[in-house]
Image (spheres, helix red, strand yellow):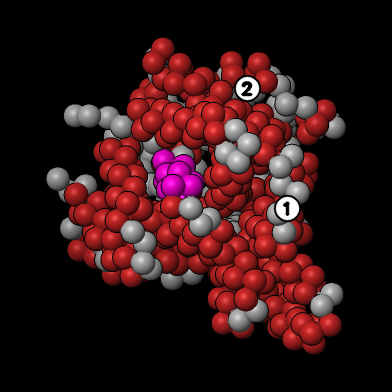
Amino acid sequence: MIHLVPILSTAVIEVLVLRRLRFGWFIVALVLAGLLVDASYLAYTPITKRSYDGASHVFYIDFLIEHLRLPPLGILCTTCGHPPLYYALAALWSKVVLAGGWIPHGLGLQWLSLLLSGGFVVFALLLLRSFIERPAILRLAAALVVFWPSGILNSVRVHNDALASPLMLAAMYFIARWDRGGRQRDFGCALGACALALLTKATGYALAVTLLLMAALRCWSPSLRRDSIRLGVVATVVLLGSALLPLAFRGSEAPPTLCQRVLGGACYVPSGAFVSNQPINYLYFDVPGFLRDTSSMNYPPKQDYFWNGLAKSSLFGVMPLGKDFEGVRYDRLAIVMSVLLLVMVAVCIAALAFSRSVRWQDYRTIVIASASMLALLVAFRIVLPTPFHEDFRHIFPVLVPFCLLFGKSVERTGRWSLAFSWAAIGVGLLLIASSVVFFVRIP
């Protein structure tokens, strides 16, 4: 019964926020249905399950609570080199909301992750609504975000991605609003989200780069040049300060190498854990291998291809899911979802042939943001080639542009073939249904 507290409180907050933002009851119902799936997953997933570095994150949080300072760096704490914002928030949450031990500490931290996951969904809906006009297409794209398999996996995971992902998505949303409308309030919100993302995880650099690139692009317009240069300078100063602030907190204990200063504990990787790092690993996609390796059961992979790892982790994460997902039923569901993902990608590629009338300026922010995240992930994998560094969770906000692209592809292809459009909708609905069946357990 104690699990009802985080679920019901999160549901109330989500309803109030979504209705305040004027989303219809159908969207609200979708989000609540997604929350029920997350609740089912939470019921059989304690903090130690499907969270290969969960203990290290909890150590960071507990150390802050007990000592009121950052923990020492070291190989035994692989997350202690990360910026402190998420851990400070989790420590404050533990001292205020979870005070008195009225709820188990692990469950309380998962509750925080569930709330942050709800924040990600809210910004996803805002971004989708700003680009999609047709209610049916908006609902399809929204449902894909809400019920995406790895989104369910991450919804209760205690990890700094829980805060980094909504901050990065919020930055993408406000940068897009600023680029389209030119309001300085949106620029301020975008800059604030980027700065907070940098204080949370190094993945925030992708959105910081996006903001600076958008300021540079706006300089091409003579009427916007002076204002864009001024805002670009402000952004550079603020973002640089945000990047350096975590090092200032550590003082004399600052990491000795550039890699450790930028990527933290990710640099503590023994060379024996490295996988193949040849050009073919980034240029080839092994379709049979992608369909054969279900739920990341074959770990570590014999021939690790970047795109295979990225696509598979977008569904099931980078590590085996454990005994809860063993058996023929789950293997078959995993294959079905893998096939459906490939079909969705094919639909998006096919629709690009009919996108000549699309105005680049309308979508350039999300294209540049997605490209920046992907480019930094590729660079991360090249510098430190392990399967963990091609994990989709590092660029999880890319899910929203992908769902937007799929929704717009369905809409555009419907202009020349209703049968093709309806088939594409069916693929999306099948993925949603498969995800629900994969994760829901009925007591």
Nearer the observer: mark 2 or 1; the answer is 1
Residue 35 image offset from top left, x and y in percent: 31, 47
Q: Which residues are magenta?
A: 136-147
Name the residue furthest left: 1
Q: How many marks?
A: 2
Q: Quadrant of residue 92?
A: bottom left
Q: Helix or strand or loop: what does disc 2 sit on?
A: helix
| Image quarter of the C terminus | top left
Position in image of residue 268 (x %, y %): 66, 46
Vertical arrangement, residue 430 with respect to residue 65, above or below: above
Query: For mark 2, does the 10 Å Cα neighbourhood hold few (<14), some (14 to 19), or many (20 or more) residues?
Result: many
Residue 193 shown left or right of residue 365 in the figure:
left
Residue 145 in view, yes or no: no
Q: According to the image, label 2 marks what residue?
A: 290
Point out the tag, 2 or 1, that comes first from the N-terminus.
2
Identity of the residue drawn at 85% across and 32% down: 279
Counting from the top left corner in percent of width and height, residue 154 is at 45, 44
Q: Give above or below for 33 relative to 369.
A: above
Q: What amino acid is labelled 1 in the image?
A: Ser
Amino acid on which the number 2 mark rests in the picture: Phe
Q: Nearer the viewer, residue 291 or 306?
A: 291
Above or below 173: residue 399: above
- Viewer-proximal residue among 52 and 438: 438
Q: What is the chief secondary structure element of the magenta stretch?
A: helix
Checking the image for residue 33, the label placed there is none
Identify the residue under disc 1: 357
Alpha carbons under labels 2 and 1: distance apart? 34 Å
